[in-house]
Image (spheres, helix red, strand yellow):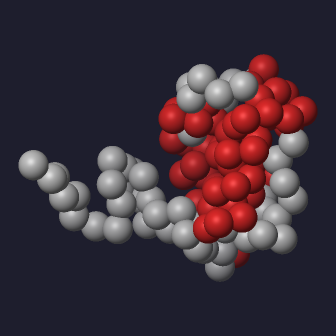
Amino acid sequence: MILTVPGPWRGGIPPLPGYIGSFLNDPEGRVYVLHVPGVASSGLDDADLAALLNYVNQKWGDPKARSLTVEEVKLNREHPVADVVKLRRDIVSRFVREGVKAGAYPWP
């Protein structure tokens, strides 16, 4: 059985193409991306996580965005974000004001 989810996302995750680059081009967006629950708890080491996110950005984001470094990943893992949903809401609100693409997000 294949389940379909209405809207442009699956599992509460907005589409990456066209939007991930916006987050990786923004200092707060970079922090957010590194604290998304599935990313932060992926089990990948810092080097593999940096490589994966850089690949995702090269494939679907902005190839001109500064690559994530192993040091940046490590530093962000050492400093957790208390409320990652609030962080995303704040970033997306700012993106909307600035006319930056952020993608539709299925939950408030």
Q: Residue 48: x, y in percent?
A: 73, 35
Q: Nearer the viewer, residue 64 or 29?
A: 64
- Residue 86 visible within the image: yes
Q: Residue 63: x, y in percent?
A: 78, 69
Q: Nearer the viewer, residue 9 or 31?
A: 9
| Direction left: furthest residue | 1
Q: Residue 79: x, y in percent?
A: 76, 23
Q: On the picture, is 13 further left or further right than 66? A: left
Image label count: 0
**Residue 18 placement: quadrant:** bottom right
Above or below residue 41? Residue 12 is below
**Residue 51 placement: quadrant:** top right
Above or below residue 18? Residue 81 is above
**Residue 5 placement: quadrant:** bottom left
Could you tell me which residue is drawn at 9 percent across and 49 percent down? 1
Could you tell me which residue is drawn at 82 percent across and 47 percent down? 68
Above or below residue 24? Residue 72 is above
Could you tell me which residue is drawn at 33 percent across and 54 percent down? 10
Q: On the picture, is 75 further left or further right than 83? A: right
Q: On the picture, is 19 further left or further right than 104? A: right
Q: Residue 100: x, y in percent?
A: 66, 74
Q: Nearer the viewer, residue 20 or 82?
A: 20
- Residue 83 visible within the image: no
